Image (cartoon, rainbow, N blue to C red):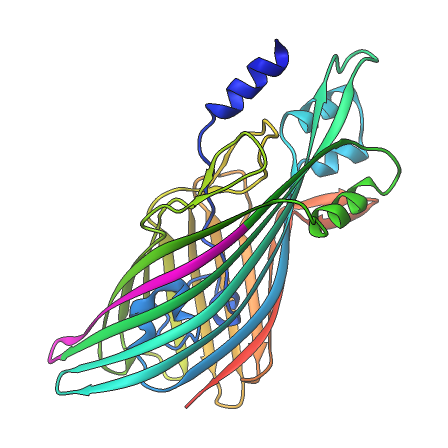
Amino acid sequence: MKKILLSCMFLGASVNALEFGYMGNKAFGMGGSGVALSSNPFSAYYNPALLGVDAGLKVGYSFGARYKEYNISELSNPDINTVKNFLNDNSLNVTSENGLAIQVPIPLGGIFSSAIGIGLFYTKIGTINFIANGDVNGNSINTRIIMNSLDLAEIPLSYSLNIFSSFGSFNIGINAKYINAKHSLINQSFSGNNFIQDAFDKVFDAKNGVNTNAFGVDVGLSYSLPFNALVIGVVGKNLNTPNINTMGNEKFQLDPQYRFGISTGIIPLTTLSLDLDLKENIEFRGLDNGMDKKKVQYISLGSAVDLTFMDIKLGVAKNIANGAEGVLLYGGFGFKLIDISLFSNINTINNNGKKIPTEFGIKIGGGFSF
């Protein structure tokens, strides 16, 4: 009977979605604020309307990883209260985001211009969660570890149309993207001193899983003044809500994401940008684990100084849907073809006497334009 009730609970559970991710080094180093960042080679990811705002061919690449934990540090102090808190809400996520993007301008003459783009965006998320059956106060507790792996590959074909006027440039862009997804799920007892490492070895080496082939649609708008003195952008991603097959009982789909951005290049050699999620998204913390869904809605502020031979980036972001999460700090520097960017949460946990952030990430990438 318990198994039947548990299955019914999962079948009726709310559908999962994803948060607005990070792709490319420039927006990442600026706090993730890329919806109005016209000089970004990864415009197709953040806002396809920006493809043609800056004329010229752009090529970019980026590889990176980040982690985030909830209550895993409670394992270092295993009394009854902390064990209860830990088993009620815990997760450890590792996300790898990698991409390649190309933008090509197409002059049309008169007041019109356009641009096309193609990209390959690959995201892999590995999550582990601990669940328990039985009496925490007694000796009958049975603790298990659930491992989820989600691979998401997107190939967008992008197009933007730009209309020039004495009031500025108006731009509309669209992505028609092919999506390939794979989800795998492992549920087992855990033991040994290296069970967390062993769990991630399994989840990142998952060979079994279910595949999905789907299509997604993104639409973006932007308005810019000459010399990018002011750029305003808004984007809607996954507007058709693609469904993803899963191994478990919980459903999963890519819910629409909406984000607003504004940037200015009025200060010489400097770009300032701000992004805001217009709706709450759901953070992926695995399926069929009984954990609460975490809402995320980010506001981010970034700056970049371009010194011709190198650029320096700084950013800050906050999840305004969850006041308990700390502020995220970002930074990076690059020499065009090589760029290193990273971020860290100001919240820390105690790990064997050392304080480490609850979130941390790094990206290596680069690109060029002419």
* Left or right: where 153 falls relative to 112: right
Give the residue drawn at x 45%, y 70%.
119
Q: Residue at x 76, y 25 (%)?
A: 143
In the image, 319 versus 207, the foreground residue is: 207
- Pinpoint residue 169: horizontal percent, then vertical percent: 19, 76
| On screen, residue 41 above or below 6 | below
Side of 214 where 331 appears, left or right: right
Q: Nearer the viewer, residue 147 or 68?
A: 147
Q: Of residues 64 and 118, which is closer to you in this image?
A: 118
Range shown magenta: 165-181
Q: Is residue 265 left or right of residue 367?
A: left
Q: Is residue 361 visible?
A: no
Corner quadrant of residue 352 = top right
**What secondary structure is the magenta-colored segment mainly?**
strand
- The image shows residue 152 at horizontal and vertical percentages of 53, 54
Which quadrant holds residue 131?
Answer: top right
- Quadrant where the image shows the C terminus: bottom left
Look at 53% across and 90% down and name the residue there. 309
Q: Is residue 166 inside the magenta stretch?
A: yes
Q: Does the magenta run of residues contain 82?
A: no
Q: Is residue 230 left or right of residue 22?
A: left
Q: Quadrant of the N terminus?
A: top right
Percent of width and height locating residue 115: 30, 78
